Structures are given as structure tokens and as C-alpha cells.
């Protein structure tokens, strides 16, 4: 599944008239970004000769039990396995993206636990965290 296909459901939410489209698109886009990073990390793991197809279930169990399978932990895993860091691959926009992902994760955690964010984010502010493919100008 391509990146564009992965995020097509986010686009459908944003284009809808549903009252909850902002928070829904926000949460789903962050989940999908983490999924993309998880896919990269697991792909890299399988490049090592000590792992094979039969190790998939055990790897899933390990990831499921970990409390670090969010974007920051996955990024650390990627950086440990790949010769170039995520920062090197992204370039000059890395710090802004990292800050946005950190803030989005903090907001997501509050929202998922039924708490208010200290910023009282509006639909438009939540949607501003959603990266669209292709990006809207």
C-alpha cells in the first residue's frame, strides 16, 4: 500500500461534513504516520539474516508488549538499524516535523483519554496537524 493510499481515508474524513471530522482526521493521520514508521522499522529488521518469515509473530508480540511503539521510539529504532538517520533523510524540515509530531502525540494522548488539551484546540487547529498528500498550499 502506498503512502497516498494509506492516507486516502484521512482525505475522505477531511472532505466530509461530519462534525467530528477534525478530531477524526487528526487522530487517524497520527496513527497512520506511526504505522508507516513501524512498517519501515520492521522492514529493516527483516533485512538482517538472523530473521526470517517465521519470526513475524514473535516480532509482533514484542512490539505489542512495548510501551515505546510510538513515533519517537520507532524513529530511534529506525536510526539504530539504518545507516542514515531520519533527520538526514528529511533534511532541513526535520526539526519542525519532529516538533509537530511531538505536539500532535501529546494532544492525541489527551484526546484519547477524554481530557481537554490545555490549548482547547479547535477543529481547524487539529486539522492543521494533518499532512495531506499531495500537501495543500
Image (cartoon, rainbow, N blue to C red):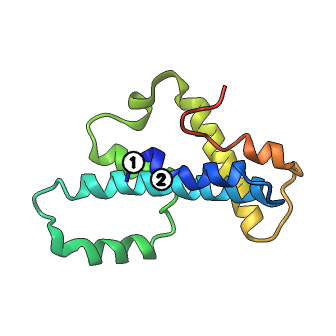
Q: Please, which residue is most extreme toward the top here?
A: 92
Furthest-left residue in this view? 49
Assign a secondary structure to mark 1.
Answer: loop
**Element at label 2:** helix
Q: Is residue 97 above or below residue 113?
A: above
**Marks 1 & 2, CB-CB < 8 Å contact:** yes
Circle 1 residue: 2
Camera-nearest residue between 58 and 121: 121
Name which residue lies at 26% across and 52% down.
Answer: 44
- In this rendering, does residue 74 appear at all? no
Along the line of sight, the residue nearer the viewer: 91 or 35: 35
Residue at 76 percent across and 62 percent down: it is 110
* Residue positioned 63% across, 46% down in the render: 102
Query: Residue 47 in the image: x percent, y percent?
Result: 17, 53
Residue shown at 86%/61% (left/top)?
116
Q: Nearer the viewer, residue 100 or 133?
A: 133
Query: Left of 76 or right of it: where is 10?
Result: right
Which residue is denoted by mark 2 in the rendering? 6
Q: Which mark is residue 122?
A: none
Residue 98 in picture, x, y percent from top left: 57, 38
Q: Position of residue 75 (x, y in %)?
A: 44, 48
Measured from the top left, where is residue 90 in percent x and y? 45, 30
Q: Which quadrant, please, contains the C terminus? A: top right
Amino acid at each position: 500500500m502506498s503512502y497516498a493510499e494509506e492516507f486516502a481515508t484521512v482525505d475522505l474524513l477531511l472532505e466530509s461534513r461530519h462534525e467530528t471530522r477534525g478530531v477524526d482526521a487528526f487522530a487517524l493521520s497520527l496513527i497512520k504516520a506511526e504505522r508507516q514508521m513501524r512498517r519501515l522499522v520492521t522492514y529493516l529488521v527483516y533485512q538482517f539474516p538472523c530473521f526470517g518469515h517465521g519470526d513475524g509473530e514473535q516480532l509482533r508480540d514484542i512490539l505489542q508488549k512495548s510501551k515505546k511503539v510510538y513515533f519517537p521510539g520507532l524513529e530511534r529504532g529506525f536510526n539504530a538499524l539504518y545507516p542514515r538517520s531520519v533527520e538526514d533523510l528529511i533534511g532541513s524540515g526535520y526539526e519542525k516535523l519532529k516538533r509537530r509530531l511531538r505536539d500532535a502525540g501529546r494532544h492525541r494522548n489527551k484526546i484519547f483519554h477524554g481530557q481537554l488539551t490545555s490549548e482547547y484546540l479547535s477543529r481547524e487547529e487539529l486539522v492543521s496537524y494533518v499532512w495531506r498528500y499531495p500537501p495543500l498550499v
